[in-house]
Amino acid sequence: MSLLESIRVALEGIRANKLRSFLTTLGIIIGIAAVIAVVAIGQGGRAVLMSEMEKVGTNIFAIYPDWQSGEQPSGRSFDLSDVQVLKDKVPGISDLSANSVTMDDVRGSKDKKYSQVWGVSAEYEHIRKLNIKNGHFFSKEDDSLGRRVAVLDQALAEEIFGRSEPVGNKVSIGSTPYLVVGVVAKGDSMLGFSEEARAFIPSRSWTNMFGPYINNLEGSAVSREKVQEAMDQAVKVLERRHRDNKYISYSMEQQMQSANKITGIMTLIIGAIAGISLFVGGIGVMNIMLVSVTERTREIGIRKALGARRKDILTQFLIESVVLCVLGGVIGMILGAGGAYLIAKVAKWPPLVSWWTALLAFTFSAAIGIVFGILPANKAAKMDPIEALRRD
């Protein structure tokens, strides 16, 4: 019997027992669909995460004090003059900001809100690529002179001013009045603080009000390739200036690599769990094929009596098992891709069903048919024709 004839006979057998064939392949369908959907959703989520991090900027870095275990941060590991010194001595740095943050009441004409108050340098606008909705960000002159000017996040501005225009009006941070010069538009990035209420004031104003506490230095390098070099040089300059302190640096590139690694591991783990159903489905195929061998004992006896070789019987049952699993794999691929598309549409990210995932799923489903079809096929091939013909 030729290969095409064997496949035709296998398809006729599946058509004759539609319900049993469907139940046999159900485990394969679910397993393949789950694996493809999980991998596609994981890849889509990873692509969105990487895209959002790139929006923030791949050349961003930050420098923190390297606090030893049990040590209490004093907040005096930096001073405001470090910003200009680093920009003068490290050619790879494009922009740099001294960042401080605390919580305090911010009061407008309508209401007040307990919010984050950030002390940042004027260059923070360029580092974080802030989108100014109204007005402008404060200037380097505002920063150096410690002027009492503030830039509000749109969420905070709307809450404490209502429909009134905040730019040109005053807010009270704690009990200190500040002139609002700008409003930062709500961002669409999942990584920013677009949903948090924040007020930005110049670093010098912040230290004059809350004390000389600087959390970190945040900057951007002239290019993505210069980030590591700029961080290393900045750390060396700081450790020479502040001999009692040690510093560590992080870059957005490092965070992207860590996030990529974590999402990859999570996708692999969840995909492996989904793949367990493939194993269960394979066992189901094997059991049904064993039942099929028992039901077709007389047929096997007749075929052997007419000259069918052991190899012919083995091949026939293996092909039937593979055809069942491949059909289940194809249906599973369609359902998996459809499920990934629907979930991605709800989550608003692209479903990335890669060709290699579909190829791997197809190959795996065929392999399951071979592996779990060997036992029933071998049982059929070993039957003695005389004994087989005696059975009813």
Image: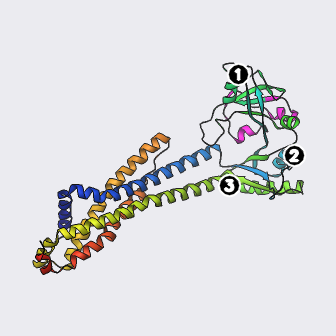
Location of mark 3 (residue): 225
Q: Earlier in the sequence, mark 3 or mark 1?
A: 1
Location of mark 1 (residue): 161
Q: Earlier in the sequence, mark 2 or mark 1?
A: 2
Q: Residues within 10 Å of mark 1 (few under 14, many from 20)?
A: some
Image location of residue 227, percent across then percent down: 71, 53
Is 141 magenta? The answer is: yes
* 352 with respect to 285 (left or right): right
Question: Vertically, is 213 above or below 287?
Answer: above
Instruction: State the CA–CA distance, disc 3 to disc 1.
Output: 43 Å
Q: Quadrant of the C terminus?
A: bottom left
CB under 8 Å between discs 2 and 3: no
Image location of residue 251, percent across then percent down: 70, 52
* 307 with respect to 369 (left or right): left
Q: Quadrant of the N terminus?
A: bottom left
Element under label 3? helix
Image location of residue 293, percent across then percent down: 21, 70
Name which residue type carries label 1.
Phe
- Tell me if I can see residue 45 in this picture: yes
Q: Nearer the viewer, residue 270 or 165?
A: 270
Q: Which mark is residue 79?
A: 2
Image location of residue 285, percent across then percent down: 30, 64
Residue shown at the point (78%, 47%) measured from the top left: 217
